[in-house]
Image (cartoon, rainbow, N blue to C red):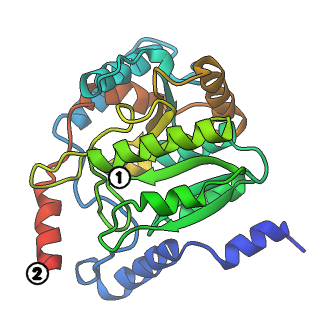
Amino acid sequence: MAVAKRIEYSIKNASLIRKMFEEGIKRKAEFGEENVFDFSLGNPNLEPPSGFREVLTGLINDPEPGHHGYMPNAGYDSTRQAVADFLSRNNRASFSAGDVIMTIGAGGGLNVILKTLLDPGDEVIIPSPYFMEYNFYLENHQGQPRIVPTAKDFSLDLKAMEDAICERTKAVLINSPNNPTGRVYTKQELAGLGIMLDKCSRKLGRTIYLISDEPYRKLVYEGIEVPGIFDMYRESIMSTSFSKDLSLPGERIGYVAVNPAIREKETIAAGLIMSNRILGFVNAPALMQRAIPSFLDASVDISFYRKNRDMLCE
């Protein structure tokens, strides 16, 4: 056998999203880019926000030495502090640089979180429908997915989630706005989820963590609010990226944020930093870490995406 059995199995059951994307590339070459509409990967249709190229050019032309070397595994202190300030503006809690770890996108961040939290056989509850790559991420760290269907309107079925919690449950993984349904979980849902997880944690005598995957956070319409998890549950960790809202998926830049009130914060933060290094990520790209503090409050013009959504729905 040329490869490990687990990898051979994964190849055979590889993401259909990726297969569709690769088929799209072939068809674009055959029929012309303008004649193929690719609904597979979440590749942006827009360029990064105005001013991004200028900021990048300025950073590249900065003559100060050392800008392309290793930095602390958690990222540049200045970038982490800028992200912490952004989070403090958008949550009731006050974040510090120590609550932020810069990562290789949200996917890298989720792998760092799972590597830090999971022992072999630990279960992670995931509301369905969900992003199918989560299965591979869990397998990477010997975790088991426990899939729980959502309600007919794709809202969280808290009763079903509570029924799924057992001695092996280590975390709940949510994604809001959800890929693929687009569902945004309400304050009431998240508050109820927090209450339920607190109750179950006390019953089990150990912590059940809430992990939130949020790369689509700014891509919402009609003034819909995307509530944060940090105000809803103490034992919470978030992973996100700038792939969607700044149209930078190829640059692989994101971060993990830990609730400032989380218990055993120092141990968890140290575990995240260690996992970031030993997974081979080492640290997030230096150039992008220096660029994104200028764009934390920015976003691409999502009216383009809203127009596409409206056409598709109609």
As drawn, the label of residue 314 is 2
In this view of the protein, can residue 252 be seen by the observer?
no
Tell which residue pokes out farthest to the right in this image.
1
In this view of the protein, can residue 13 be seen by the observer?
yes
> Circle 1 sits in a helix, a strand or a loop, which is it?
loop
Q: Residue 311, position in %: x, y?
A: 12, 76
Which quadrant does the N terminus fall into? bottom right
**Residue 36 in the image: above or below residue 79:** below
Q: Residue 251, position in %: x, y?
A: 43, 44
Which quadrant does the C terminus fall into? bottom left
Circle 1: is it few (<14), some (14-19), or many (20+) Cα within 10 Å?
Answer: many
Residue underneath mark 1:
176
Which residue is found at the position 38% from the left and 62% from the top? 179
Which residue is found at the position 59% from the left and 39% from the top? 201
Q: Residue 21, position in %: x, y?
A: 44, 74
What is the CA distance from the residue labelled 2 to the residue labelled 1? 24 Å
As drawn, the label of residue 229 is none
Q: Residue 10, position in %: x, y?
A: 70, 71
Mark closer to the chain start, 2 or 1? 1
Which amino acid type is marked by label 1?
Ser
**Residue 94 in the image: above or below residue 185:** above
